[in-house]
Image: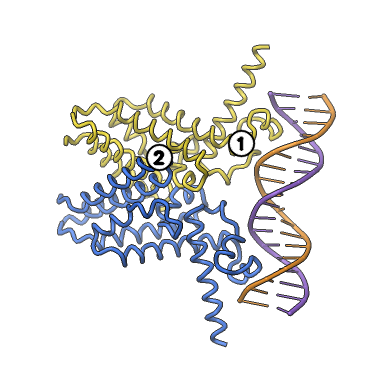
Chain colours: A blue, B yellow, C orange, D purple
Amino acid sequence: MAWKESHKQESRQRILLAAAALFTRKGFNNVGIDEVMESAGMTRGAFYAHFNSKIELYEQAIMTAGITAAQRFNNNAVDHMGLIENYLSEEQLNSTDICCPMACLISDVAHDDDRVKDIYTRLYKGFTKHLAKFDNSDCDDADNNEDKILMQSVVMIGGLALARSLTDKALAKKILRLSSKAAQQLHTEKV
Amino acid sequence: MAWKESHKQESRQRILLAAAALFTRKGFNNVGIDEVMESAGMTRGAFYAHFNSKIELYEQAIMTAGITAAQRFNNNAVDHMGLIENYLSEEQLNSTDICCPMACLISDVAHDDDRVKDIYTRLYKGFTKHLAKFDNSDCDDADNNEDKILMQSVVMIGGLALARSLTDKALAKKILRLSSKAAQQLHTEKV
DNA sequence: GTCTATAATCGGATAGAC
DNA sequence: GTCTATCCGATTATAGAC
């Protein structure tokens, strides 16, 4: 019976990955369960064998999106500067795949209840921790270093989120470019 | 009959101000027409004498929110530094009143259609123009100056949006504080 | 576990009285 | 113009067959 259990877990994972891509790209309310399940290669009826409600899926999909996005940036980036460039790349502008939930759901989450905000907060702390680990700055002032990381996160998340909301694509690209430069300077500069 | 027309305009304005506050605070889908009209002191039936659809109200409410927020920051700020401080103040964190749509709807808008994104883009350009006017930098390099303004906007909008999405209020306040400092440094520094 | 069919709900939009 | 009452579409959630 073991293969049956693993088959269920595979289905569940397909649903989560589909949901992570759709929710980060279109938001919670603009995506129906139909759409998620179709994208996962199933029909609506099967949904409730895996999740109790749409909101439960949403919460877990945000986690999945965050972890998946982090893994991808990890794998593609050679160093901290590369990570920043990848994060603020033009590819992220209109990507139809999973987008970093920190940026793509930043104000969506602000309108949700505390359960969702808690998940977002946890992911954000992971995001900054990850930035800090990548940061090979030799600065001794730990507090000041943490401040730098926080400002890097503001510029990266804010820059990507802003760029994705503009119809003026030239302006959006300029914002990406400048944000990338600014985040990299925050990384390079000594204090 | 003139008073009748002005009465209608007053009702319309009450609806717009109520909608601007509710939509920026709770998002488009978490606010019903019932709630908007009640907040404006009317009932749902009266709504369609003023707007053709909820989405039309949303579009105009975003404009109203942007203009109203700008006016308030204008009136309360003595200079550019004060403007930044007000924008990234703790009062903006949990404000139940109209919030700057640049920050409070940043990812919401990314999930909407181009009509909404166009309005957001126009407001954003007004936002940066306003920052530039306030900026009394004596730098001669116009391009570089524009770049500085864009990065200020990323830090201000991103910092406020991020802070509003976190349940860890201490961390949120720290992000506001650091963002304010960073935006002010961008304003002060010579190139 | 997954499917099809259906129930239940919610919210946007309309009709008609005042 | 504003009100109450109603319609109707969309979508979440459930029931029951396989």
Q: D9 above or below B10? A: below
Q: B170 above or below B8? A: below
Subunit of label 2: A
Asked whether, in this view, residue B58 is left or right of residue A175, the answer is right
Residue drawn at 45 percent across, 65 percent down: A64
- Helix, strand or loop at label 2? It is loop
Quadrant in the picture for the N terminus of chain A: bottom right
Residue drawn at 30 percent across, 65 percent down: A76
Q: Which residue is mark 2?
A: A168
The image quarter in which residue B146 lies? top left
The image quarter in which residue B132 lies? top left
Asked whether, in this view, residue B70 is left or right of residue A181, the answer is right
Q: Which residue is mark 1?
A: B36
Which is more toward the observer, B47 or B53?
A: B53
- Amino acid under disc 2: Asp
Residue drawn at 43 percent across, 33 percent down: B122
Subunit of label 1: B
